[in-house]
Amino acid sequence: ALPPPSGLTRTTCPYCGVGCGVLAAPDGRIAGDTEHPANKGRLCSKGTALGETLDLPGRLLHPEVGGKRASWDAALDAVAEGFRRAQSELGRDGVALYVSGQLLTEDYYAANKLAKGFLGTSNIDSNSRLCMASAVAAHKRAFGEDVVPGLYEDLEEADLVVLVGSNLAWCHPVLFQRIAAARAVRPSMRLVIVDPRRTPSAEGADLHLGIKPGSDVALFNALLAHLHDHGLTDHAYVYAHTQGLDATLTAAHADAANAAERTGLNPADLATFLRLFAETPRTVTLWSQGINQSETGTDGANAIINCHLLTGRIGKPGAGPFSITGQPNAMGGREVGALGHVLAGHLDWSVPGEADLVRQHWNAPNLATSPGLKAVDLFRALGAGRIGALWVMATNPAVSLPEAEVARDAMRRAPFLVVSEVMRDTDTAAFAHVRLPALGWAEKDGTVTNSERVISRQRAFLPPPGEARPDWWIIAGVAARLGWGANFAWPDPAAIFREHAALTGLGNNGTRAFDISGLAGLSDADYAALPPTRWPVPAEGATTPRFFADGAFPAGRARFVPVAHKPRPEGDGHLTLLTGRLRDQWHTMTRTGGVPRLMAHKPEPELVVHPADAADLPDGSLARIASHAGASAVLRLRHDTGQRRGTAFAPMHWTAERAPAARINGTIPPAVDPVSAQPALKSARVA
Ligand code: SF4
């Protein structure tokens, strides 16, 4: 890459899984990085406003113990003592870490090493559980490993792009801009939106399928049956590289018989979609939270993958299933194993010998021996007294978890809660016994991985404010106080990255896709200058931009997964509440909420309903919604004929501090996908 223009630092946007390259300066100048493959110079409204978030009011600038300012020594001593005490009273699994896709890969790696390697517990889960756990589970079921086969260029090279449960125009705007630009050059390229809402992504699309919530499995089962019945099966590929088709087709045909009724679609629209997909070999199906955040999220993702396996449309230019992640480094967390059910480096407890490789690499005789608690269960265990010490890093579960009141109550009663944060007064930090000031975006140094497997450097261009420190440094400080200093004696993030990269090559004879052992020997200078780099980067052998066109699956053969539509309740006088993001806001608004021009887009939380579902409430009324969980929220009502009858939409951003009555995830029951344990944040029934 070319050196950045004078005074600018080449770094990465912290907001979403597109992972755009940014040029940034301490005086607030921001520009898209034309050298970065994800955005090629583009930025969205949030990225463009990054310069207005550098001087956030309300930063946490000093460690605090018991609400009082403390030295780092005293704070780290308190954390170590709290964790030691909890484990002596409750055993190894009496402690937990709840971390975040906001962490850099090096921070994530250090947290996972502390938990699984040295505290000896797998009770470490990430807010990525709320975001893409169903995609991870679907990849593992189908391919044998969590791998996104394609890259963003495929979205431009496709002749048909299908967006499922993704308002890409608002949630991953630069990727949507890339698709729009490709369509402008090549008008024959088709765009289909599958979403109960007519979102901004549907404007200008060739077809919008306003599907019933939760009927994605039925839609893609109908598609699988249609493709097979119309001779579109790639028999050579299926025969040579897959298994399980017969049982999967039986399940698919059962749903296909009644697909229009199951999906709530106009039969003509459904037929158009089936025909478009069938006649277009270069098809990318991209999915996001509309699939993942569901009690059938993993099945929905596998239903999509099944269609691509059947037709051999995978890992080819312009063709493949594509999961897009929400957070900037959700992928990095998956890579280092910072979820309760996986080891580091895509290694797996279920594969003989792989746990030993991690144990030896870390010199960690007490390595956890089995998977740990996942987000919702982790906070339940806290509430039930089975977790005596919890450390929350860079996330706000008091707002973002389903049935958030239950999590708040658990944290309020927690014997020992540590919060590492950029901001002092988050809803979660209010319950903390120890608050640890962490570095923010402009001050941190490390790497992130975006949705197309590109590892990018995030580089500091501002000095640490107050006494804030890197997350990895804080974790290493606690580890040292617990007696493991030699195992965490990294001088800088480059050393952590090398250790992480070396681990990914252990025992890999070419069957594991994730391998960056070729980066394990980076010098400090190479690491500092690392250009955006797509994995795999094996120490030996060739790299590849895409996976699986050759049928070389980590599982040996790819697996078709039989899935069946599960009808949801409807017609009982309730609405199905769909939740999601707004164009100009990020998560719980800690950063974007302070920028007036971003707030101007949607200044207050709105409940969007079809006018026929709220005929007695004029547009602009205040509306209270009440869920089966007995929780409620109050929002400004807005009529929109693009909202599917029987559904409502509300944004998930507002916190107790900004709008206590509009914390929407408090109204969501804690149901989870049984395979991935991802909360079904889009399935509340509300009155
Ligand atoms: Fe940042 Fe995502 Fe916008 Fe790119 S698309 S500038 S990564 S928020």
Image (cartoon, grey):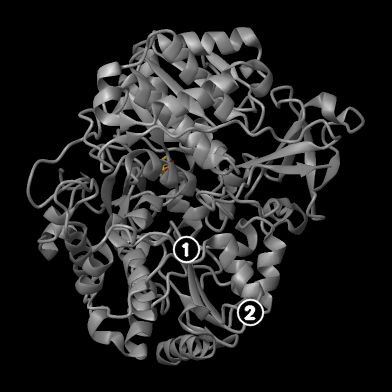
From the top left corner, tell me how far across and down residue 359 is, in percent.
25, 73
Residue 407 pos. (x, y %): 66, 66
Residue at image location 50% in from the left, 23% down from the top: 250
Left or right, 607 with respect to 537, comes to right
- Ligand 1 quadrant assignment: top left
> In the rendered view of the protein, which quadrant contains the N terminus?
top left
Query: Dot 2: within a 10 Å radius of its alpha carbon, few (fewer than 14), some, or many (20 or more) residues?
Result: some
Location of mark 2 (residue): 385
Q: Tell me what residue is drawn at x 65 percent, y 55 percent.
A: 402
The image quadrant of residue 642 is top right
Q: In this view, which residue lies farthest toward the left?
A: 540
Q: Is residue 125 left or right of residue 449?
A: right
| Residues at marks 1 and 2, CA–CA distance in whole angstroms | 18 Å
In this rendered view, identify the residue nearer to me: 244 or 297: 244
* N-terminal label among 1 and 2: 1
Residue displayed at 85% across by 35% down? 572
Question: Is residue 606 placed above or below 518 in the rendered structure?
Answer: above
Please give the residue where the numbered disc 1 appears in the rendered image. 125
Depicted 4 relative to depicted 649: above or below: below
Instruction: Give the residue type at disc 1.
Output: Asp
* Residue 425 visible in this rendered orientation of the protein: no
Q: Amino acid at mark 2?
A: Gly
